[in-house]
Amino acid sequence: MLQACEEVLGKQAVQKLKAIPISANTVKRRIEDMAEDIENQVIKMVKNLPFYSIQPESMDVSNKALLLCFVRDECKGELQEELLCSLNLPGGTTSSEIFEALNSYSLEHGTEWKKCIGICTDGAANVTGHLSGIVAKVKNVGSPRHFVYTLHYT
Protein backbone atom coordinates (compact mmCIF):
# COMPACT_ATOMS: atom_id res chain seq x y z
CA MET A 1 0.00 0.00 0.00
CA LEU A 2 2.85 2.33 0.79
CA GLN A 3 4.35 1.78 -2.67
CA ALA A 4 1.00 2.50 -4.30
CA CYS A 5 0.61 5.61 -2.17
CA GLU A 6 4.06 6.81 -3.22
CA GLU A 7 3.20 6.32 -6.89
CA VAL A 8 -0.10 8.14 -6.62
CA LEU A 9 0.45 10.76 -3.92
CA GLY A 10 4.22 11.09 -3.52
CA LYS A 11 6.83 10.48 -0.83
CA GLN A 12 5.43 13.08 1.56
CA ALA A 13 2.12 11.22 1.77
CA VAL A 14 3.98 7.97 2.49
CA GLN A 15 5.72 9.59 5.46
CA LYS A 16 2.36 10.74 6.83
CA LEU A 17 0.91 7.24 6.45
CA LYS A 18 3.89 5.67 8.22
CA ALA A 19 3.23 7.93 11.21
CA ILE A 20 -0.25 6.47 11.74
CA PRO A 21 -0.12 3.65 14.31
CA ILE A 22 -2.12 0.61 13.25
CA SER A 23 -2.57 -2.36 15.54
CA ALA A 24 -3.41 -5.88 14.42
CA ASN A 25 -6.94 -5.38 15.78
CA THR A 26 -7.36 -2.21 13.72
CA VAL A 27 -6.34 -4.01 10.54
CA LYS A 28 -8.64 -6.95 11.35
CA ARG A 29 -11.56 -4.62 12.04
CA ARG A 30 -10.99 -2.70 8.81
CA ILE A 31 -10.87 -5.91 6.78
CA GLU A 32 -14.11 -7.07 8.42
CA ASP A 33 -15.73 -3.68 7.70
CA MET A 34 -14.67 -3.82 4.05
CA ALA A 35 -15.96 -7.39 3.70
CA GLU A 36 -19.30 -6.41 5.24
CA ASP A 37 -19.56 -3.42 2.92
CA ILE A 38 -18.91 -5.56 -0.16
CA GLU A 39 -21.46 -8.14 1.00
CA ASN A 40 -24.04 -5.37 1.53
CA GLN A 41 -23.37 -4.04 -1.98
CA VAL A 42 -23.91 -7.48 -3.53
CA ILE A 43 -27.09 -8.05 -1.50
CA LYS A 44 -28.39 -4.64 -2.58
CA MET A 45 -27.61 -5.54 -6.19
CA VAL A 46 -29.51 -8.84 -5.89
CA LYS A 47 -32.50 -7.11 -4.30
CA ASN A 48 -32.65 -4.59 -7.15
CA LEU A 49 -32.43 -7.18 -9.93
CA PRO A 50 -35.60 -8.31 -11.68
CA PHE A 51 -34.09 -11.83 -11.93
CA TYR A 52 -30.86 -13.57 -11.02
CA SER A 53 -29.27 -17.00 -11.08
CA ILE A 54 -27.00 -18.73 -8.57
CA GLN A 55 -24.15 -21.20 -8.59
CA PRO A 56 -23.79 -23.01 -5.27
CA GLU A 57 -20.54 -24.93 -4.77
CA SER A 58 -20.04 -27.12 -1.75
CA MET A 59 -16.65 -28.39 -0.70
CA ASP A 60 -14.96 -30.09 2.19
CA VAL A 61 -11.84 -28.27 3.28
CA SER A 62 -9.93 -29.69 6.26
CA ASN A 63 -12.96 -31.76 7.31
CA LYS A 64 -15.17 -28.65 7.30
CA ALA A 65 -18.04 -28.44 4.84
CA LEU A 66 -18.24 -25.05 3.18
CA LEU A 67 -20.72 -23.57 0.72
CA LEU A 68 -19.80 -20.83 -1.71
CA CYS A 69 -22.67 -19.24 -3.58
CA PHE A 70 -22.14 -17.01 -6.58
CA VAL A 71 -24.86 -14.83 -8.03
CA ARG A 72 -25.09 -13.99 -11.72
CA ASP A 73 -26.97 -11.35 -13.63
CA GLU A 74 -26.78 -9.47 -16.86
CA CYS A 75 -25.71 -5.83 -16.78
CA LYS A 76 -25.52 -3.79 -19.99
CA GLY A 77 -25.32 -6.92 -22.10
CA GLU A 78 -22.52 -8.51 -20.07
CA LEU A 79 -22.70 -11.35 -17.57
CA GLN A 80 -21.70 -10.34 -14.04
CA GLU A 81 -20.72 -12.85 -11.38
CA GLU A 82 -20.23 -11.96 -7.73
CA LEU A 83 -19.56 -14.03 -4.63
CA LEU A 84 -22.79 -13.74 -2.67
CA CYS A 85 -21.83 -15.72 0.42
CA SER A 86 -19.55 -18.27 2.02
CA LEU A 87 -21.39 -20.39 4.57
CA ASN A 88 -20.39 -23.17 6.96
CA LEU A 89 -22.34 -26.41 6.61
CA PRO A 90 -22.13 -28.03 10.04
CA GLY A 91 -24.08 -31.14 8.99
CA GLY A 92 -22.28 -31.82 5.70
CA THR A 93 -23.03 -31.26 2.04
CA THR A 94 -26.44 -32.90 1.71
CA SER A 95 -29.13 -31.15 -0.30
CA SER A 96 -31.04 -30.36 2.88
CA GLU A 97 -28.01 -28.77 4.57
CA ILE A 98 -27.11 -26.74 1.49
CA PHE A 99 -30.66 -25.54 0.94
CA GLU A 100 -31.17 -24.71 4.62
CA ALA A 101 -28.00 -22.61 4.64
CA LEU A 102 -29.01 -20.79 1.45
CA ASN A 103 -32.60 -20.32 2.58
CA SER A 104 -31.54 -18.97 5.99
CA TYR A 105 -29.18 -16.55 4.28
CA SER A 106 -31.91 -15.49 1.87
CA LEU A 107 -34.41 -14.90 4.69
CA GLU A 108 -31.87 -13.04 6.82
CA HIS A 109 -30.91 -10.67 3.99
CA GLY A 110 -34.26 -10.31 2.26
CA THR A 111 -33.36 -11.74 -1.13
CA GLU A 112 -36.32 -13.29 -2.88
CA TRP A 113 -36.34 -16.85 -4.21
CA LYS A 114 -39.07 -15.93 -6.70
CA LYS A 115 -36.46 -13.85 -8.57
CA CYS A 116 -34.10 -16.83 -8.90
CA ILE A 117 -34.60 -18.10 -12.43
CA GLY A 118 -31.65 -20.44 -12.73
CA ILE A 119 -29.08 -22.56 -10.97
CA CYS A 120 -25.72 -23.59 -12.38
CA THR A 121 -24.55 -26.86 -10.83
CA ASP A 122 -21.94 -29.56 -11.14
CA GLY A 123 -24.69 -32.11 -11.82
CA ALA A 124 -24.40 -33.88 -8.45
CA ALA A 125 -27.54 -35.73 -7.39
CA ASN A 126 -27.84 -33.76 -4.14
CA VAL A 127 -28.21 -30.62 -6.25
CA THR A 128 -30.17 -31.76 -9.28
CA GLY A 129 -32.50 -34.42 -7.85
CA HIS A 130 -35.98 -33.59 -9.17
CA LEU A 131 -37.71 -34.36 -5.84
CA SER A 132 -35.22 -33.54 -3.10
CA GLY A 133 -32.30 -31.74 -4.76
CA ILE A 134 -31.51 -28.09 -4.22
CA VAL A 135 -33.04 -27.17 -7.58
CA ALA A 136 -36.36 -28.76 -6.58
CA LYS A 137 -36.28 -27.05 -3.19
CA VAL A 138 -35.59 -23.63 -4.74
CA LYS A 139 -38.44 -24.17 -7.21
CA ASN A 140 -40.76 -25.05 -4.30
CA VAL A 141 -40.05 -21.84 -2.36
CA GLY A 142 -39.63 -19.62 -5.41
CA SER A 143 -41.68 -19.34 -8.51
CA PRO A 144 -41.44 -22.57 -10.53
CA ARG A 145 -43.19 -21.09 -13.55
CA HIS A 146 -40.43 -18.49 -13.82
CA PHE A 147 -37.63 -20.99 -13.35
CA VAL A 148 -35.86 -21.01 -16.67
CA TYR A 149 -32.83 -23.26 -16.49
CA THR A 150 -30.47 -25.54 -14.68
CA LEU A 151 -27.02 -25.69 -16.19
CA HIS A 152 -24.41 -28.35 -15.45
CA TYR A 153 -20.70 -27.79 -15.71
CA THR A 154 -17.89 -30.29 -15.40
Image (cartoon, rainbow, N blue to C red):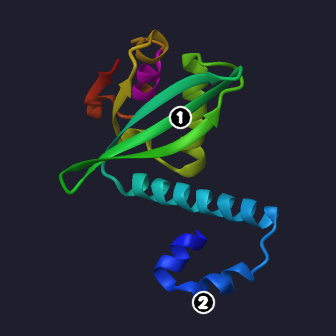
User: Residue placed farthest to the left in the image?
Assistant: 77
Q: Which mark is residue 142?
A: none
Q: Secondary structure at mark 2?
A: helix
- Dot 2 surroundings within 10 Å: few (below 14), some, or many (20 or more)? few
Quarter of the figure with the C terminus: top left
Q: Which mark is residue 68?
A: 1
Q: Residue 145 placed where, x, y %? A: 27, 30
Q: Nearer the viewer, residue 22 or 79?
A: 22
Q: Residue 138 placed where, x, y %? A: 44, 28
Q: Nearer the viewer, residue 15 or 23?
A: 15
Residue range (magenta): 133-139
State which tag comes first along the sequence, 1 or 2: 2
From the viewer's perspective, tell me whether residue 141 is left or right of residue 72: right
From the viewer's perspective, tell me whether residue 18 is left or right of residue 38: right
Amino acid residing under circle 1: Leu
Task: Answer with the quarter of the image where residue 90 lies.
Answer: top right
Q: Which mark is residue 12?
A: 2
Asked if the magenta segment contains residue 147, the reply would be no
Amino acid residing under circle 2: Gln
Q: Residue 95 placed where, x, y %? A: 54, 18
Q: Nearer the viewer, mark 1 or mark 2?
A: 2
Q: Nearer the viewer, residue 3 or 60?
A: 3
Q: CA distance from mark 1 to mark 2?
A: 42 Å
> What residue sits 49% from the left and 45% below the top?
84
Q: Secondary structure at mark 1?
A: strand
From the viewer's perspective, tell me whether residue 105 is left or right of residue 71: right
Task: Answer with the quarter of the image where residue 131 lies.
Answer: top left
From the viewer's perspective, tell me whether residue 112 is left or right of residue 65: left
> What residue sits 39% from the left and 23% below the top?
121
